[in-house]
Amino acid sequence: MLILLLISLITLLISNIFIFLSLLISKKSIMDREKCSPFECGFDPKTLPRLPFSLHFFLITVIFLIFDIEIALILPMIISFKSVNFLIWWKISSFFIIMLLIGLYHEWNQNMLNWTI
């Protein structure tokens, strides 16, 4: 039991000595703290944490993602044209494209496609 206590004390002492030496030897200064701060979307970490941004910008991003996914879904439809019955293919692809056009019309009615803020 005494040996375990002595080993743990020596380990604690050695680790504290190393920590103290690293603090003395390190070249960190107050100016280096900015390098360690998290970089988040180009915002300055020394300003207010929550700056308001345009909701219009967010909605344009969502529109881009929707149309990006649309392209990823339409390309396999074109490839599968030869292997599936034409009537079934026509119904599925026209339903998909009509849904996308309805969404585009709704975004156009809400003036989300205007680039002016």
Image (spheres, rainbow, N blue to C red):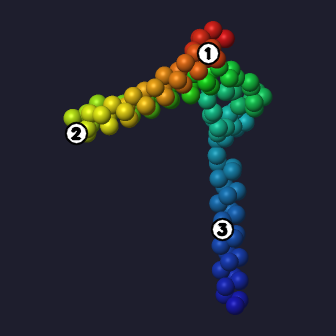
Q: Position of residue 48 (x, y in %)?
A: 78, 28
In the image, 101 versus 51, the foreground residue is 101
Task: Indicate which disc, 1 or 2, sits on the residue closer to the N terminus.
Answer: 2
Task: Indicate which disc, 1 or 3, sits on the residue closer to the N terminus.
Answer: 3
Task: Indicate which disc, 2 or 3, sits on the residue closer to the N terminus.
Answer: 3
Residue 96 appears left or right of 34: left
Q: Secondary structure at mark 1?
A: helix
Q: Whole-Å distance between the Cαs marked 2 and 3? A: 72 Å
Q: Secondary structure at mark 3?
A: helix
Q: Which residue is mark 1?
A: 109
Mark seen at residue 14: 3
Q: Residue at x 70, y 90 (%)?
A: 1
Q: Secondary structure at mark 2?
A: loop
Circle 2: residue type: Ser
Q: Residue at x 67, y 58 (%)?
A: 19
Residues at marks 2 and 3 touching, judged by CB atoms closer than 8 Å: no
Quarter in which the C terminus is drawn: top right
Q: Position of residue 21 (x, y in %)?
A: 66, 55
Circle 1: residue type: Asn
Circle 3: residue type: Ile
Whether residue 32 appears in this view of the structure is no
Q: Residue at x 56, y 28 (%)?
A: 62
In the image, 40 versus 73, the foreground residue is 73
Q: Which residue is mark 2?
A: 83
In the image, 38 versus 96, the foreground residue is 96
Q: How many marks?
A: 3
